[in-house]
Structures are given as structure tokens and as C-alpha cells.
Amino acid sequence: MPPDTARTRAKLLDAARAEFAEHGIAGARVDRIALRAGVNKERIYAYFGNKEQLFQHVLTESLQELNTVVTMPNDDPAEYIAQVYDFYCARPELLRLLVWEALYYGHDPVPDEERRVTSYAAKLQEFADHLGVKPSPDVAQLLFSLIGVAAWQQTMPQMSRVLLGADSESEEARANRRKHLIEFTRASIASMKQS
Amino acid sequence: MPPDTARTRAKLLDAARAEFAEHGIAGARVDRIALRAGVNKERIYAYFGNKEQLFQHVLTESLQELNTVVTMPNDDPAEYIAQVYDFYCARPELLRLLVWEALYYGHDPVPDEERRVTSYAAKLQEFADHLGVKPSPDVAQLLFSLIGVAAWQQTMPQMSRVLLGADSESEEARANRRKHLIEFTRASIASMKQS
DNA sequence: AGTCGATCCAACAAAGCAGTTGGCTAGAGG
DNA sequence: CCTCTAGCCAACTGCTTTGTTGGATCGACT
């Protein structure tokens, strides 16, 4: 295999990630992906099959990245949530991909949903460990809610602007929300532990 | 004006709402909207201009509905959040429309964003009143976060299934999450008040 | 009944799009 | 130097989709 193949594949995946994050599955244009990558369109079909399968490749790759980058830190679950927030601020594309996927598949199962179960179970285990409790439906509810809070601002920029003010994307506002997030997380963890 | 006009318009808006909620702006098909409504496609262009403007009409209408249906109840802010949750469970289309819009416009302002500011300010006022505090950025942060938690399950069904289990859409699981939501809300309100 | 104005619609035009094909190129092995 | 293979690409195909148009329809008013 010529050395260019891997590079070409990678360039396509990068371009596709940007395109899909911006426009979603229906809105993405295969021509545009090829153009961005500086590669011929036909390669997409040769490597990935079709548009939807390409989307899956992009998503799988992105989820792996998310899984390795955002880890459970020192011993503070609140810091973990803040890290999730930081990550989605820094790399909004990954969240957007997940949201496009959610809208596209709705309540139908997404491709290889099973594989995700294990990696989320691991995260849940870690989270519970740091809380000093056993993984349980309640802990899962809590983690799920907290991830939601951390992601909500990037998920709904219009609502954020309307409710938190037009400058809610400034550096200062971001630091402020981060602080809010940490307090919020601590409070909800404390209340769960005592019950 | 013939009496049918208003009816035709309404039928189109209903069909468009369903179509847009399901497929988003890029994925929606004008033909399909006309077909669902049992009306000729040309009427859409006569009444609404084009696909994107039709989307805006649908969204405006839906936001009004949301605003009138989900009101601040008795005196319990936690019950309000639970009501938001119930509403999004019962009418997921409205949330989906908002999410499609968020992805479509991203960080650019959405059409007539100003008008929304006032209605959200009213909600914030009500919320603060029930908390017995003045509206402030902190209260807004809290309300925004809580809306996020209430909406998160419908926003991310895949993540919900993966983290909370495949049956997370059952009636029982829903009641369970509702309970979690109320406790969660109470805890975060209590912690905000004391600080 | 006849005319007028507005609504409706089947068929059309033009552009955009996903996916294909057939030939080109470069490098490895003989 | 020739051949064979595997990646590469410009041009093309056929279908889908948005938006338009010219004539049919229907009710109101005279």
C-alpha cells in the first residue's frame, strides 16, 4: 500500500468531521468534503462506502478521542464535569456530531450502540468510585444530568444568549459558568450522598 | 378571503412542523410537507416564501405554544422543572425544532432573537420570584442549567439509552427520572440560596 | 347567468446532488 | 525496460429537489 493511502484517508476524515459538524448528515455535501480534503470524491466511496458510513467513521473516531482526552482527574468529580465543559467549549464539533446523530437516529438505535455501553459503564464506575459509592441507577442519573448541564451551553447557543446575555460566549462569562458548574455539581453530589 | 385559506395555512404549518421536527431544515422535503398537508406545494411558496422562512414560521408558532403551555405553577420551582420535563416528553417535536435551529444557526444570531429575550426575561422573573430572590446572573445560570437537565434526555436519546439503560424510555423509567429531577432541582436551589 | 378576483394545482425548468466509470499514473517485481 | 497492480482523478449519469408558471376552479357580487 502506497504511503499516501493512510494520509489521504486521514485528510478525508478530518474534512468530513468539519463538514458533518457544521451541516449534519443531510446538509453535508460530499463534493465539499472532497474539496476541503483536496482529494477526489471517488476516494470517499472507495474507502468508506457512502455518506452515512463516512459519518459513522467520523463519529467513532471522535468518540475515541473524547474518551481518551476527558479523563477522571485527581479525586474531584466536580472537576471532571468542569473538564467535560472545557472540552466541549474547546472542541464544539464533537458535541455537534453527537447532537446531529441524536436528531438523525432519534429513538432508533445508532450503529454499534453496544460498543458504547461498555465505555460508558467504565466512566460510570470511575465516577461512582470517586463518590465512594457503588454504581447504581441513581448514580447514572446523576452523571447523565451533570453531563447534560456541562454540554447544554454549547448545545443551545441561542438559548444561552437569550437567557444568559449576548456576551455569554466571552472568556469572562465562560469562567463564570465554569464556577457555577462546579458549585452546582458539588451541591447535587452532596444531596445524593446524604439520601 | 375564502374561508379555506386559514385552514390551508394551518394544515401546511402542522405538516411542516412534523417534517422539520423529524428531518431538520436541510433534510426536510417541501414535496413531503405538501403531501402530508394534502395541499399543493406551490401554496408553501405563496404563503411563506421558501423553506427556511417556513421553518421560522413553524418555530415561532411552536415557541408561542411552549410559552403558554408550560407555566410556573403553585409555588414550587422544582415542579416547574418537572413540568418542562413532562412537556418535552409529551411533545418532543418542539425540543427537536429548537435543537435543529441551534445546529443550523450555531453561534450566529437566529431570526428575531430579540423577541425571545423578553419572554425569557419574564420566565426568569417568575422563577426568581418563587425563589424569593431578585433576578440575577446567578439565578439565570441556575434556570438555564435546570432547563438543560430537564431537556437532556430527549435531546440525547442515544446517550440516555447507553448510560441509563435500553428501557430508559419506559413509563417507569420516566417516572423515576422525574423524581430524580425534582430532588436534583431542590438540592441545587437550596445550595444557591444559602450562598 | 356572467364576470371578476383570488385561490388552487399539474406539469415544467433548472440546478444540485450522490454515486459511477474508464482511463491515467506511479512504483514494485521481473 | 516492460508489466502488472493499486491508488488516483475528471468527467459523466441519472435522479432528486427547489422553486415557477399558466391555466383551471370556485365563490362573490351584479
Image (tube, coloured by chain):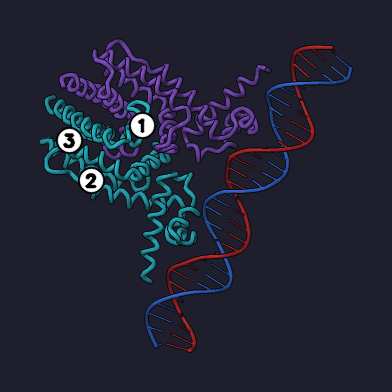
Chain colours: A purple, B cyan, C red, D blue
Q: Earlier in the sequence, mark 3 or mark 2?
A: 2
Chain containing the residue with disc 3 = B
Identify residue for label 1.
A154
Local packing at callout 3 (Cα closer than 10 Å; few below 14, some 14-19, many 20+) is many
Tell me where residue A156 sits by quadrant: top left
Describe residue B133's horizontal placement relative to residue B24 as left or right: left
Mark carried by residue B70: 2
- Above-or-below relation of B69 to A171: below
Mark carried by residue B78: 3
Local packing at callout 1 (Cα closer than 10 Å; few below 14, some 14-19, many 20+) is many
User: Where does the image place residue A194, in percent across and percent down from the top left?
Assistant: 15, 19
- Above-or-below relation of B184 to A193: below
- From mark 3 to mark 1, how far is it between C-alphas? 24 Å
- Marks 3/1 in contact by CB < 8 Å: the verdict is no
Q: Amino acid at mark 3?
A: Ala
- Seen at 26% across and 15% down, the residue is A134
User: Where does the image place residue A193, in percent across and percent down from the top left?
Assistant: 19, 19
- From mark 1 to mark 2, how far is it between C-alphas? 24 Å
